[in-house]
Image (cartoon, helix red, strand yellow):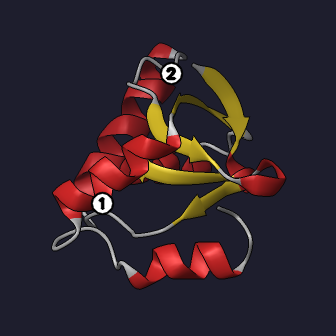
Amino acid sequence: MRWIKISKLRILQHGGREPDVIRNIVDEVRETGKWKIDPIVVIKLKGGWYALLDGWHRVRAAKKLKMKKINALVAPKRKMFDWIADNAETWFDVEDLEKLRQKGWL
């Protein structure tokens, strides 16, 4: 795991829009003063970028807290394809993968 810059994230697909989840994360961090939330899951792209696979709410909460970095688990690229296969219908627009290739990020 490592702390990565939020500005270096490429969000392929936005997660659910449950504001209560984000609010709960923000409230917990403000109350405890610590980020005790599970790390987000990313894969490393070309050029120092990262594609977000899991953790959309955590990223939104971190942005609300004006954090510059977030704790991330960097998964091997092959995990991205497993993730796409598991989530293609509900979370991922497969055209986004082609966009990443066209931009030279993969």
Where residue 49 appears, as percent x and y from the top left, is 73, 53
- Disc 1: which residue: 84
**Dot placed on the residue nearer the N-terminal end, 1 or 2:** 2
Residue in front for this viewpoint, 104 or 72: 104
Question: Which residue in the protein does label 2 denote?
Answer: 35
Quarter the N terminus occupies: top right
Q: Nearer the viewer, residue 63 or 38?
A: 38
Q: Residues within 10 Å of mark 1 (few under 14, many from 20)?
A: some
Q: Give the image quarter of residue 62.
A: top right
Q: Position of residue 61 (x, y in %)?
A: 48, 46
27 or 25: nearer the eye? Answer: 25
| Amino acid on which disc 1 is placed | Ile
Q: Which residue is drawn at 41% across and 50% down?
A: 80
Residue 31 quadrant? top left
Q: Position of residue 4 (x, y in %)?
A: 70, 35
| Left or right: residue 47 compared with residue 30 | right
Residue 105 in view of the camera: yes
> Measured along the vertical axis of the image, is residue 16 above or below residue 34?
below
Which circle, 1 or 2, is nearer the viewer? 1
Q: Residue at x 35, y 47 (%)?
A: 23
Give above or below for 32 relative to 22: above
Circle 2: element type:
loop
Amino acid type, mark 2: Trp
SS class, disc 1: helix
